[in-house]
Image: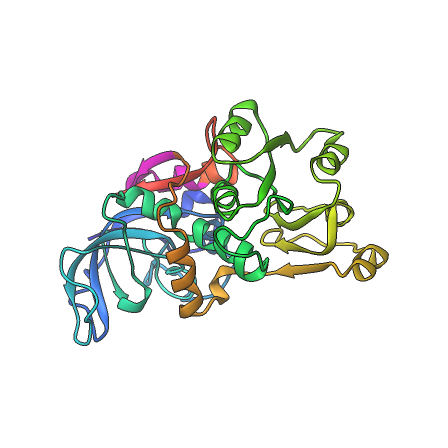
Amino acid sequence: MRAAVFTSPGSPAVLQVRERPDPGEPGENEVRVKVGAVGVNPIDTYVRSGAVSAGPRASEERPRVIGCDWAGTVEAVGAGVTKLAVGDRVWGVSRGISRDGSAAEVICEPAEQCFPVPPKGALLNAAACGLAAVTAHLGLFRTGALGEIGSGDEESSVFVQGGSGGVGSIAIELARRAGYRVATTAGSDEKRQECLRRGAEEAFDYRDPELIPRLNRFDPGGFEVWLETHRDPNVPNAMSLMRVGGRIVLLAGRDAVLTVPLGQLYPRDLSLRGFAMFNASPAELQTATAGVAGIEPLIARTYPLSEIARAHADLEAGDTGDRGGKLVIEL
């Protein structure tokens, strides 16, 4: 079978498409999946570059397959699998952190880590949702402690930093569906219009020198949750815009160093909450995947497997097209 691999950490150029051994029949409680689409995420670039060193070490003798998100069709089921059958369409996340990844024509996956693709959904959409959708749901409802669908009272608001990205675009829709007012940022008129289409009440230019007063006017009472997706967040600015008891959720900025004004933090019962989707329990993943059912992801661009190196380069350069969204590999 063909798979996208690397033999040593490095730039996108280290990615190659090679023939790899077929994984064979599924083991106990596993299913064999013919992969149809694979999402491209920042974590993939960290694994490829060596910024994240978890999992097997890549070498010429042992090339490592890249990729986390995937969607495909069940080809065979192993002993003990009762909830999946041959022909079922499924998707999954976080495969390639501690083991070989998903950018391959065939994978064998634990059945409990396979989630159903909606009857009218496309494999492409399921792969694009993947990590981004689960991250958005966990960030808002588990870590951010928002109420679920219908709980917003139209007096509570959420800020989503980077609303045209894979996580941000889904977070807008999830928060709005739950009944909260949503403000967001994006870097172009086209991307801001897409944010409004997905449910944001206001979409601002993140480079606007008047952004802070504009956000203050949006909700003078302050945001209940601030979902931060930028790699170099301005936490003091965020803290100044939060209501008492507000939660700032940090899910990016691996190399950022924060200076936190404690005088803004503890007197107003604010909290900074960091999380990584890969720490979620199977039960939390099940809740999140059920919660994003029916969400249509924003797909910026698709690539064949042979061009996965270009997809990585585009992601690292921030090149996600006019509207933004996810980059996806089609097999």
Q: Is residue 325 above or below residue 282?
A: above
Looking at the image, residue 117 sits to the left or right of residue 94; the answer is: left
The answer to which of 115 and 312 lies nearer the viewer is 115
Asked whether 127 or 149 is in front, the reply is 149
**As drawn, 156 above or below 53:** above
From the viewer's side, name the closer residue of 312 and 235: 235
Place of residue 222 in the rendered image (x, y in percent of width and height, measured from the top left) = 72, 46
| Identity of the residue furthest to the top in this view | 189
Q: Residue at x 57, y 61 (%)?
A: 143
Counting from the top left corner in percent of width and height, residue 329 is at 32, 42
The image's colour scheme reads rainbow
Does residue 82 appear left or right of residue 174 in this picture? Answer: left
Which range is magenta?
A: 301-312
Q: Position of residue 45 (x, y in %)?
A: 47, 49
The overriding secondary structure of the stretch rendered in magenta is: helix
Q: Is residue 55 above or below residue 194?
A: below
Q: Would residue 197 be visible to someone looking at this image?
A: yes
Confirm whether the magenta stretch covers residue 83: no
- Percent coordinates x, y for residue 82 in the rendering: 19, 71
One can see residue 104 in this view: no
Image quadrant in which you'd find residue 125: top left
Quadrant position of the C terminus in the picture:
top left
For image coordinates 61% across by 32% down, the residue present is: 202
Rendered residue at 33%/38% (across/down): 307
Left or right relative to 318: residue 4 = left
Which residue, as the protein is rendered here, is positioned at the far right?
263
